[in-house]
Image: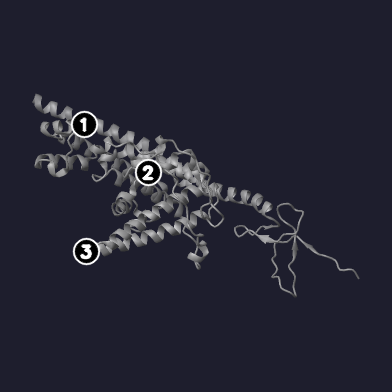
Amino acid sequence: MAETNTILTSEKHSVPSPLNPPSRIICHVCQKQFSLYTCPRCNSRYCSLHCYKSHSLRCTESFMRENVVEELQQMQSNDETKRKMLEILKRLHLEEEMDSMDEEDDCLLSEETVQKILSGGSISFDDLSAEEKKLFQRAVASGELSKLIEPWDPWWLKPSARTISLSKEGTQLVQPVVEQSPQDDGVGGQSCEIPPGPEAPLTPIKKLLPSAEPSPLLAVHLVDIIYSYCFTLRLYNGDWQSDATGSAMVVLSISSVLSQGGQPETVMEALSYCLEQTCSPNYRHMGGLQFGLVLINDVISLLSLGGPALICALCDLRRLIQAGEKEVKAEKSRTSRRSEIRSKLKVADRKVYFIICWVHEQPGEAWSSLAAIASAERRKIVVYGKDANSARVKNSAERKRKNLIEEMK
């Protein structure tokens, strides 16, 4: 009697063995070949890479659509979120008003020093008078001198950032050499190349979390981390290597996820914290809210570029943190503060590596969806900023009216 092959179309999975050959289930995608594999996300059976890609697109699009709809529903304005953002922006406007009242029209250098420079002579910091040193340090702290530095063009805004490719293991692929014009060079002749990706294959998330699933909030945490990276690079005009320790400390001061173990639950919550640090007295000289909005655009740009660009950015951030930790370790003084900084940088390094591995395993559709959410939140912040400014103007007019009435009395 001839042997017959049974074709199964059920979802029941068999356990193959020498005595029990695998059940011959038809591919759920093409419906033509026998399936050999199972999708880990939805358990659909497929026969080849082509069918997996076709199935994966439908699967991930549906999955992401549901998540985006849910996130967008949670993003609806509520009184508490608006109140917190308005408080931050009102405080920023008030501080800016106080600063403008305290401004002094100081001359940085004396006439004698200026003439010495104009005549071709060179001066050092030690050549300055005590008053000139004081004014110079004030100009550095306020960011006034940074206006004299040629602006840096972020690598994620360059056309080459759209062509980054990584291997299946996450490592950098060989990229074609593109000739750069002198205008493309950074300050001091440094090349503005795309930061390299991982040097070694990335560890699968299942090995990093063998008995648990990654947090669903990692996408929100990614926004926080990328914002801190963009902030630091813009603050240092792209040259974080000139002060690795200082750069690493700036990252920790901006990111609640890397410095405090923060767990923001929404994109707005993550951006609100980052904006509050950006508008703080330490960094207000960078431009306050307007600078913060530029940084949100940077985050949106990197998210829109997709996984490879995000991985390169996170790898650059990891190198920054590691360089800072190495410098701190090399310091001769052994204090509790030094040990605390090293410990924080080591923890931040591990967090960044974990999120690199997580980003590598996410579908490409995830990043365009997250970029859309960040864009929507940015628009809300702009509206809140206008509301806060209107309230400030109204309060100022009210104060002037009351003062006028008091004078008339």
* Viewer-side label of 2, 1: 2
Question: In the rendered image, which residue does mark 3 sit on?
Answer: 333
Q: On the rendered image, what quadrant is the C terminus found in?
A: top left
The residue singled out by tag 1 in the image is 396
Residue 51 horizontal/vertical position (percent): 68, 52
- Give the crowd class for mark 2: few <14, some 14-19, many >=20 residues within 10 Å: few
Comes first in the chain, label 2 or label 1: 2
Quarter placement of the N terminus: bottom right
Mark-to-mark CA distance, 2 and 1? 48 Å
Number of numbered labels in the structure image: 3
Residue 205 x %, y % = 50, 62
Q: In the visual, does 320 lie left or right of 165?
A: left
Q: Are marks 2 and 1 in contact (CB under 8 Å)?
A: no
The three-letter amino acid code for the residue at tag 1 is Ser
Q: Earlier in the sequence, mark 1 or mark 3?
A: 3
Q: Indicate the position of residue 246 as horizontal and vertical percent values.
A: 28, 52
What's the distance in space between the residues labelled 1 and 3, CA to CA? Answer: 51 Å
Give neighbour class at mark 1: few <14, some 14-19, many 20+ (Cα, 10 Å): few
Examine the rendering and report whether any part of residue 61 can be seen.
Answer: yes
Of 280 and 166, which appears nearest the observer?
166
- Circle 3 sits in a helix, a strand or a loop, which is it? loop
Q: Is residue 122 left or right of residue 283?
A: left
* Corner quadrant of residue 336: bottom left
Q: Quadrant of residue 11?
A: bottom right
Which residue occupies the foreground of this view, 316 or 291? 316
**How many angstroms separate mark 2 from mark 3 (CA)?**
32 Å
Amino acid of disc 3:
Ser
